[in-house]
Image (cartoon, rainbow, N blue to C red):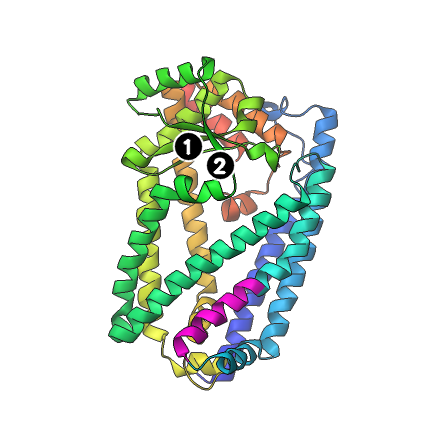
Amino acid sequence: MQAQNLFYLFIGFIVVEFLIEKFLDYLNAQHFSEELPDELADVYDTEAYQKSQSYKLVNYRFDLMTSIVSFMAVLFFMFLDGFAWLDQQVARITDSTFWQSVLYIDILIVSISLLNLPFSYYKTFVIEQQFGFNKSTKKLFFTDKIKSLLMNLFFTSLLLGVFIWFYRQSGKDFWLYAWIFFTVFMIFINMFYTTLIVPLFNKLSSLECGELKEKLRLLSEKTSYNIDKIFVIDGSKRSTKANAYFSGFGPKKKVVLYDTLIQDLTSDEITAVLAHEIGHYKRKHILFNLLLSVFTAGVMLYLLSLVIDNQLLAEALGVPKAKFHINLIAFILLFTPVSFLTGLLTNWLYRKFEYQADAFAKKYHNAADLISGLKKLSRKSLSNLTPHPWYAAAYFSHPTLLQRIKALNLSKKQ
């Protein structure tokens, strides 16, 4: 295969992926106005339902516009030999091939962040503000963006730098050492995310004594799961939307509840939500997800090692000589279809996990509180209750609300 043909193959992958995504978005938009099934009839009143319709339509049009801009920017960058041009610029800054690669990727990260910034600003302070979700200030918004960018640059530079060092020391066998390092890194982040990362953006406080804490203590005893480390996060300073999550392993595991969740749900409903999260832990979903990420990373690193010094890949992006950062970009473009397909499979698997966690919550608490809590969360976030099945299959890591309710009611009858 010639370099030019490979270049157009890259373009073809990008175009096909874009068209598939927009087709699925279009199909999903056609379902916005579908009549709600009986199981969901009480989620919205007439006014709230109309508001949810408007919210979905506004987001659909905005996301369509932003995706077209991003798509065109990528195409222009590629047809104008942007990757080769940037490679020439970093080569003028430093003679070190190591720092050329790190600087190259960092510049791309900063450029993408700057491109997305005005769209993120508009979505936060226009769309989310219009529908009553946004609680963030402009100062907090830009502070978050700067912190996120710096953290992204730090971790990306760290991983990339270590991978390049391994490559220099061991050649194509670098993937094995890189995989081991990545595994340790992932375990560390999972264990200390709430301790090290979250405080950079949010304030964590211990759950106060009261009815909710007592019910969670009883749930802890019933499920034989130690949840004495329960924290409340001040999510309300950015949005009215609610959430809850687990992090860490063993003695480092923590339960984090958004303050908006405590405000919007009853203590029984929060107990049901937490029982669902415990179900993930008890069914070893958290561990499996980590192992799956580690396995996937190992496969991708091995495949990368096969092409990291391939001259043809570099030439396809207009660079005459294979370089770590150029071949890394080419590898990402080459495996675009594979990433899409693996995304379909992992989302299908995650949806299975959600059903299992729901069943656990029903067993150790009850289905009614979980259903009512899920309905409140859907209403509060103006969720799309009638997504197109193909769209849900492609992008949803959770079953739809209707599917979850039917599964809970079915298990209740059996």
Q: Which residue is mark 2?
A: 399
Quadrant occupied by the N terminus: bottom left
For the point 62% across and 32% down, the residue is: 240
For the point 68% across and 55% down, the residue is: 118
On the image, which quarter does residue 30 sit in?
Answer: top right
On the image, which quarter does residue 23 sit in?
Answer: bottom right
| Marks 1 and 2 in Cβ contact (< 8 Å) | yes
Residue 317 visible to an observer of this rendering? no
Residue 106's x, y, as percent? Answer: 50, 66
On the image, which quarter does residue 260 sit in?
Answer: top right
The magenta region covers 96-110
Element type where label 2 sits in the image: loop
State yes or no: residue 90 in magenta: no
Q: In the drawing, does residue 402 fall left or right of residue 275?
A: right
Residue 62's x, y, as percent? Answer: 70, 51
Q: Residues within 10 Å of mark 2 (few under 14, many from 20)?
A: many
Nearer to me, 118 or 319: 118
Q: In the drawing, does residue 307 fall left or right of residue 393?
A: left
Amino acid tagged 2:
Pro
The Cα–Cα distance between marks 1 and 2, rounded to whole angstroms, is: 8 Å
Residue 173's x, y, as percent? Answer: 25, 71
Nearer to me, 338 or 152: 152
Q: Which residue is mark 1?
A: 355
For the point 42% across and 54% down, the residue is: 342
* Type of secondary structure dominating the magenta stretch: helix
Element type where label 1 sits in the image: helix
